[in-house]
Amino acid sequence: MTARIPPLMERPALKALEAHYQKLRELHLRTLFADDPKRGERMTVEAVGIYFDYSKSRITAETLTLLLQLAQESGLRSRIDAMFRGEKINVTEKRAVLHVALRAPRGQSIVVDGEDVVPQVHTVLDKMADFSTGVRSGKWKGHTGKAIRNIINVGIGGSDLGPVMAYEALRHYSQRDLTLRFVSNIDGTDFAEATRDLDPAETLFIISSKTFTTLETMTNAHTARDWTLKTLKHPAAVARHFVAVSTNAEEVAKFGIDTTNMFEFWDWVGGRYSMDSAIGLSTMIAIGPEHFRAMLDGFHEMDEHFRTAPFERNLPVLMGVLAFWYSTFFGAQTVAVLPYEQYLKRFPAYLQQLTMESNGKHVTLDGIEVTYQTGPIYWGEPGTNGQHSFYQLIHQGTRLIPCDIIAFIQPLNPIGRHHDLLLANVFAQAEALAFGKTSQEVEAEGTPPWLVPHRTFEGNRPSNTIVLDRLTPAALGKLVALYEHSVFTQGTLWNIDSFDQWGVELGKVLAKRTAQELESTDEPHLTHDSSTNALIRRYRRLRNARS
Ligand code: G6Q
């Protein structure tokens, strides 16, 4: 067990940081750069193929020392070790947190409840590889003997966002004669649009649900089965057109899927940490087992870096303490993630779940109400599109929004000048955010005095620039693991459980009860608040009048 950690506000480094912040809060990045001509080279770390430039952060060397001291005082080292050892650090669910085992190489050993989980992981990976190869090659036939050409992943939350993001991110490596689609929303439009132009005889559904009880997924799964059987007629078709990814064999069998076509994962894999488990089956079918392994190896490289690198050169730790710094001291409410890579267009949406479901918590591990802000809001869009919409607020608004700017040296689609122009925007935006444009500079351009304030940029807006060579499967693995471990670092400083999600559970339960009230033929006895009661009555009345 890990040693008892004092509450955040009582840790000596936190108190030192409070005093330090008062001295530093007004300091401008212009001054910090002017005072240290080597800052832009010094405040960088290059590790596992990632160049991380944090020089445009509102910190000094002393800030960093104190933040890393706080990480030590928060028990980060022992928490990391506990996670990698398979201890039950998800205290509210009494579960180990072992997404790192999903990418452990064959031969490594991680023991949970007396059992080495790594061989189990590889057994499932092998089974996924066989199946994926069968589908990709056309050997796996549908009920009528036609090869599968369309793959639809049905899942939601952690059983959807990772697969969608990874498919988009790695589309360049995908087998182009396969169509991959994703159905998550219980809104029937999602299913209707995903299937409207597809032939059921060539379509495979992957029902992805850890619990196999989630309302949205099970509703979509039943609709998918009806859609398939409407054309293929025979119930035996289900075995050729449906596979499951789940921890719940009993429910899978009840649905009618042969459990030999079930790909297993385990309760020590959190939904939002599951894209590299069997939940990634659609990813593996799209890009092939070798690319999938390369992605896992990328994850693993970052895991090893996080586990072993000293904090001052540890990418997830640095990223985590910086996010903590802006949130706790500058009152920053959000972090913008700005990938300058079109294939990463779903990356910010993926990170929203990873970061906000993990660290959107109001009590400490001991159940005590926190007296500080926890997880910031993560959001973003790919550059350069964001520049023509919300960047205005980041540059000249009244809020401080730290940014993560992600870029790649090599384009996957080299066309003319595009990539140089894309990267020119990366560097220009980070520079403009940090240094702005003073009123003197604006005046010197001959701007009339009344317009000067409007054209002045205060600057001093911090950003991290994260540069990789090329968006490969391994690079994606490293990036995702970077954020996973940064989230863990932040959660450790705040002393919260980054691995439960009780806020999701409540909604699941309430929706089931309300669905019964909407669907009952008799007028239901409603016991909600007056607003909810009125909304339910109104919906029932108007719906019934139409039908
Ligand atoms: C993730 C959450 C949540 C979950 C979905 C789907 O960490 O637990 O987003 O992934 O609610 O759950 P199932 O996979 O059980 O359908």
Image (tube, rainbow, N blue to C red):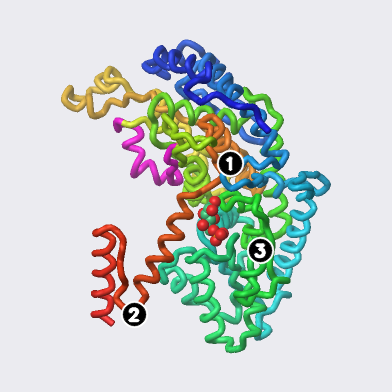
Residue 439, relative to residue 347: is it above or below?
A: above
Q: CA distance from mark 2 to mark 3?
A: 44 Å
Residue 249: say if magenta.
Answer: no
Disc 1 secondary structure class: helix
State the residue position of label 3.
Answer: 285
Q: Nearer the viewer, mark 1 or mark 3?
A: 1
Name which residue type carries label 1.
Answer: Glu
Q: Is mark 2 within 8 Å of ligand 1?
A: no
Image region (quadrant) for ligand 1: bottom right
Point out residue 368 in the picture as x, y percentages from the top left corner: 47, 34
User: Total of numbered circles in the picture?
Assistant: 3
Q: Furthest-left residue in view?
A: 450
Q: Furthest-right residue in view?
A: 107
Point out residue 379 in the picture as x, y percentages from the top left corner: 43, 43
How crowded pointer 3 is (Cα within 10 Å; few <14, some 14-19, many 20+) is rated as many
Q: Is mark 1 within 8 Å of ligand 1?
A: no
Residue 387: say if magenta.
Answer: yes
Task: Give the magenta part as a residue range.
Answer: 376-398
State the residue position of label 1.
Answer: 484
Q: Give the left or right position of residue 427, taking residue 116 as reference.
A: left
Query: Mark 1 or mark 2, which is nearer the start of the sequence?
Result: 1
Residue 166, relative to residue 468: is it above or below?
A: below
The residue depicted at 41 percent of the width and 70 percent of the height is 189
Disc 2 secondary structure class: loop
Q: CA distance from mark 1 to mark 3?
A: 24 Å
How crowded pointer 2 is (Cα within 10 Å; few <14, some 14-19, many 20+) is rated as few
Name which residue type carries label 2.
Answer: Thr
State the residue position of label 2.
Answer: 521
